[in-house]
Image (cartoon, helix red, strand yellow):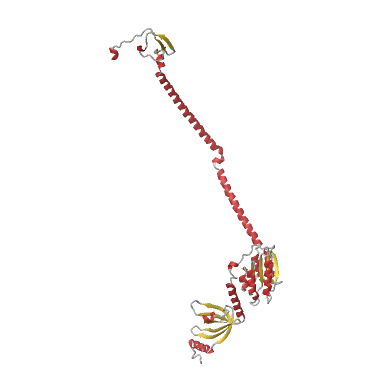
Amino acid sequence: METSPQSPAPVRQIANAIAGWVDRLGAVWVEGQVAQVSRRPGLNTVFMTLRDPVADISVPVTCSRTLFDGLNPPLVEGASVVVHAKPSYYANRGTLSLYAREIRMVGLGELLARLERRRQLLAAEGLFASELKRRLPFLPGCVGLVTAASSAAERDVLDNARRRWPAVRFEVVHAAMQGQRAAADVIEAVGRLDRNPDVDVIVVARGGGSVEDLLPFSDEGLIRAVAAVRTPVVSAIGHEPDQPLLDLVADVRASTPTDAAKLVVPDVVEEARSVTLARDRIRGAVTGFLAREQAGLDALRSRPVLADPRSLVDSRSDEVALLRDRSRRCLGHALDRAGDDLVHQRARARSLSPLATLQRGYSVLQDADGHVIDSVAGATSGAKIAVRLADGRIHATTTRTEPLEQREDDDD
């Protein structure tokens, strides 16, 4: 293509020329690291990004879903791969992409793929289930530590734990933390600590390292051994980005050995502060309760009836005295009225009594049998009679009787 300042080529021509040159390149084998994988629902195409591990260069890669799903072991981010792909240059966007026809795992990528497949198999067995996780004791009597001899991880765990709780006891078992013997040594150490009845929690600690260095902590035998122990296990392997399979089966994962020391023992200063705060809250609650009760007692005691209890008695005593006087007056009036009635009744009875008539000079004649003689016909000459007077009786004998003659004017 011949160009000059007088006859420049337009952008589209250059872009189309680049697309033609790339298209003539044909399919190529490309090595790189998978940096990103995107599987969009409903699409038969999988989008990835292939990054050069040395230079800061990346290129988008697409492949069919059938090719991606057929990979064994599965493709994961971070895997190193060799891709047989056809380069394409999109002139409209000015971007280069690769369409993968074949993907092969190589080196670390193949290793990560095997670890991923092992993780899926163990997860399918339920070894990583959350319901199997056990809680760590609040204050373990003895902490079992599995680590390399004289390692930085051992110093980090011991120093930080004793700084937080000086009275903590450790049962340290040294084991190889790298190499072919590492997995077997850790299995033996964990089993030994699990059989010790004094050990309340087990910490497996190791510093950071490469993926190859941390492979023993993804060993299937170690994973099953940790899943079978009865003592809670804390995994403190590597740094925060590192995650061997031991982290998944352990009851608690610590990001670093220092973090493990913070997880297994409490901070004595913080606990003392919590105790002080709790004691202050209890004291405040009790003091407030006593103050409220005292205020209630003071309020009751300040009432007049409690301030001078005799005042109520005195007022009631006055009421009793008034009621007593009123009762006496009422009773006196009733007795007076009853006495007057009695006098009146007695006077009436006396006025109707025959004795009162006799006291006026009258008398009553009775025969010998005590019958009242109310007619001269009842007395014969020579009969014995009794004369009843007001102050006694007179016994006499009749000499004769003389009836009175009735006059006509008397009948009138």
- Image quadrant in which you'd find residue 218: bottom right
Q: Quadrant of the C terminus?
A: top left
- Estimate the x, y position of residue 380 in percent, counting from the top left: 37, 10
- Estimate the x, y position of residue 326 in percent, counting from the top left: 48, 31
Q: Is residue 389 above or below residue 59?
A: above
Q: Nearer the viewer, residue 164 or 308?
A: 164
Say whether residue 313 is left or right of residue 147: left
Q: Furthest residue to the bottom?
A: 2
Q: Nearer the viewer, residue 396 or 380?
A: 380
- Estimate the x, y position of residue 194 in percent, counting from the top left: 67, 67
Say whether residue 155 is left or right of residue 346: right
Q: Is residue 183 visible?
A: yes
Q: Furthest residue to the top?
A: 399
- Image quadrant in which you'd find residue 400: top left
Q: For the point 52% across and 85% down, which residue is it?
A: 88
Q: Furthest residue to the right?
A: 150
Say whether residue 299 is left or right of residue 168: left
Q: For the point 58% across and 48% down, which residue is it?
A: 293
- Estimate the x, y position of residue 366 in percent, counting from the top left: 40, 13
Q: For the point 51% across and 85% down, which residue is it?
A: 89
Q: Is residue 4 above or below residue 35?
A: below
Q: Is residue 239 visible?
A: no
